Image (cartoon, grey):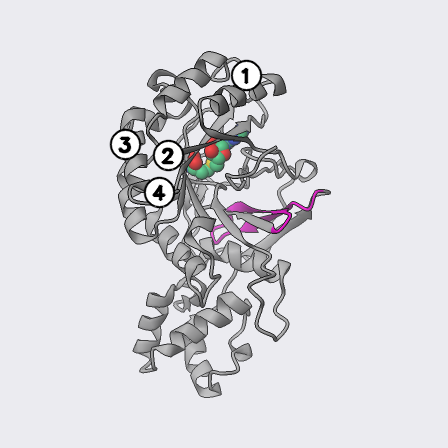
Amino acid sequence: MVNNRINLLGLNMAGLEKFVDELGEKRFRAGQLLQWLHQYGVDDLDSMTNISKKLRTTIGERAVIQGPEIVSDHIASDGTRKWVLRMAGGSDIETVYIPDGKRGTLCISSQVGCQLNCTFCSTARQGFNRNLSAAEIIGQVWIAKRLLQPYTGKPPSTQSRAITNVVFMGMGEPLLNLDPVTDAIEIMLDDHGYGLSRRRVTVSTSGVVPMFATLRQRVPVSLAVSLHAPNDELRCQLVPLNKKYPIAMLLEACKQYVADEARQKITFEYAMLKGVNDQPAHARELAKVLRGVPSKINLIPFNPFPDAPYERSDDQTIDQFQQIMIKAGYITTIRRTRGDDIDAACGQLVGKVLPRQRRQRPGSASRSIAQPPGNKSNSAWDSPADAR
Ligand code: SAH
């Protein structure tokens, strides 16, 4: 809601149908709106030429099209592009675009900050402010697309999409904000929206087991699980959520998630922390524990941040770990670090998270920028299939 008017960006097809129903309009108007907003990426009602002036005025009385405010926009020498986006209430999040040949992956955030306290993740240091709304989640895709592929007045070709993949690997735990996350995913998958296939949208989770079935039932997109350790003792230290949902339970939920889905695999993310989880014995244990789970493994060289209690494993150690996993029959890739020169490398996501108590009510946020964040800000990102 913006000044009591609904933000059209956050409405999926069902939401838009309800909206047009309430105006006494035909249902197909919802598809038109979705198409203008997301396929073409317009930001004003007057561009919507197949909708009558009268109807546009009525819509304008009840709704707005409000995208995120851009605080900064940087492009790295390798083409990686990072935006710092200001949310209502004054906190900032980050969105990163990673072009790679024909693929263009957008890494988006689902919450301002995070509640999960993984010890190797800098977002945890910042605390948690709030969940993002569906409009704020899809708004990241909307703004990136507008900037990467501005609307020219002609229908965009599906062949030359700038954004081919979306990963929820920015700030926050998507499965702890599932309703807005699924609404946003529905817009990504809708042919009138971004038209992405469900395999090209990846939700990354630290393992909120009870939500797996709901996600699968609503939008069976690709799932990535931040595993990082082959046993409960170590995983409890790295990912405290493991105390609640230990590895056996997590892996059972993973199996269920891909059951009856030929060729569908879970991507397991594994941050390589020097001397902590990167030894050959860990690899062998991991190979054993993942037996029977359709898996792909993505090793992420740890990205350090100030006062981080870990160091990045040596390249040689990472290669050795990868070889053990490959020999054991697992597809195992090493995630390249991209966008180094603009601090957009994986896993050091910072943004600017205001403390909860200082949160302003939506709508009361000052739209003028107090100060651009001069702090180091990095994003966790990547398409799970990337290799170094
Ligand atoms: N909460 C979700 C998504 C956000 S993190 C999750 O836990 O999956 C996206 C990925 O980056 C996760 O696999 C996370 O474990 C990893 N990551 C976080 N901090 C990192 C760091 N400093 N170095 C490397 N990877 C990191």
* Region in magenta: 78-102
Residue 149 at x, y = what percent? 62, 62
Compared with 317, 203 (above or below) is below
Whether label 2 touches label 1, CB < 8 Å: no
Q: Residue furthest right?
A: 77
Residue for badge 3: 252
Dot 3: element: helix
Q: Nearer the viewer, mark 3 or mark 2?
A: 2
Task: In this rendered view, identify the residue nearer to me: 3 or 267.
Answer: 267
Task: Indicate which disc residue 294 carries.
Answer: 2
Tell me how far mark 4 sits from mark 3, CA to CA. Answer: 17 Å
Tell me how far mark 2 sits from mark 1, CA to CA. Answer: 27 Å
Badge 2 amino acid: Pro
The residue under the point 33% across, 52% down is 179
Tell me how far mark 3 sits from mark 1, CA to CA. Answer: 29 Å
Q: Is mark 3 within 8 Å of ligand 1?
A: no
Tell me how far mark 3 sits from mark 2, CA to CA. Answer: 11 Å
Q: Nearer the viewer, mark 2 or mark 4?
A: 2
Dot 1: element: loop
Badge 3 amino acid: Glu
Compared with 257, 85 (above or below) is below
